[in-house]
Image (cartoon, grey):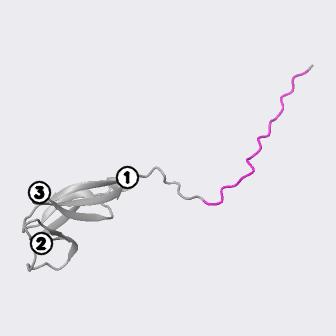
Amino acid sequence: MENKLKAIRIKRPHFKIKKVISWRWWEMKRIYKYEVLLLFAHQIITMPKGKNVLLSEQDGAIFLWREFSDEDEFNIYDYNICVHETGSEIQDGEIFIGSVNMRNGDVWHVYEAKK
């Protein structure tokens, strides 16, 4: 008797995926914290390009929190940050990031200066 090889046909499943919610389920977001110095000069903060920004005061210092995704982690930029007190002059081209109320009643305003 001769052994004959048979081709086996694999049937596909009978259901179809109609809508894909997200193929990027593995992407994670992170929040990093940076200290903003109370200087009347510009300072450079190196951080990834992200989206949401939060400013707050902790123990008399200003901190900036920035949210970014894993793909943003490799897009590192130098941000030119400047802190102004209420009533001070703001240079043309500075973009408002946010204000911080300090415990002692002072209010500081944080800007990003475009190059």
SS assignment for the magenta stretch, majority: loop
| Placement of 37 over or under 95, stated as above or below | above
Residue 42, given in percent of the width and then of the height, sits at 11, 66
Mark 2 vs 3, N-terminal side: 3
| Placement of 7 over or under 52, stated as above or below | above
Callout in the foreground (1, 2): 2
User: Is residue 64 found left or right of 85 in the rendered image?
Assistant: right
Residue at image point 22% right, 74% down: 95
Residue at image point 13% right, 78% down: 90
Mark 3 vs 1, N-terminal side: 3
Q: In which quarter of the image is residue 109?
A: bottom left
State the CA–CA distance, disc 1 to disc 2: 33 Å
Query: Nearest the camera: 68 or 41?
Result: 68
The kind of secondary structure element at disc 3 is loop
Q: Mark 1 points at which residue?
A: 70
Identify which amino acid the numbered label 3 is placed on: Asp
Q: Residue 107 carries which label?
A: 2
The kind of secondary structure element at disc 2 is strand
* Residue span colored magenta: 2-19
Residue at image point 74% right, 46% down: 12
Q: Does the magenta stretch include residue 18?
A: yes
Residue 72, given in percent of the width and then of the height, sits at 35, 56
Image quadrant holding the C terminus, namely bottom left
Q: Residue 59 carries which label?
A: 3
State the CA–CA distance, disc 3 to disc 1: 30 Å
Image quadrant holding the N terminus, namely top right
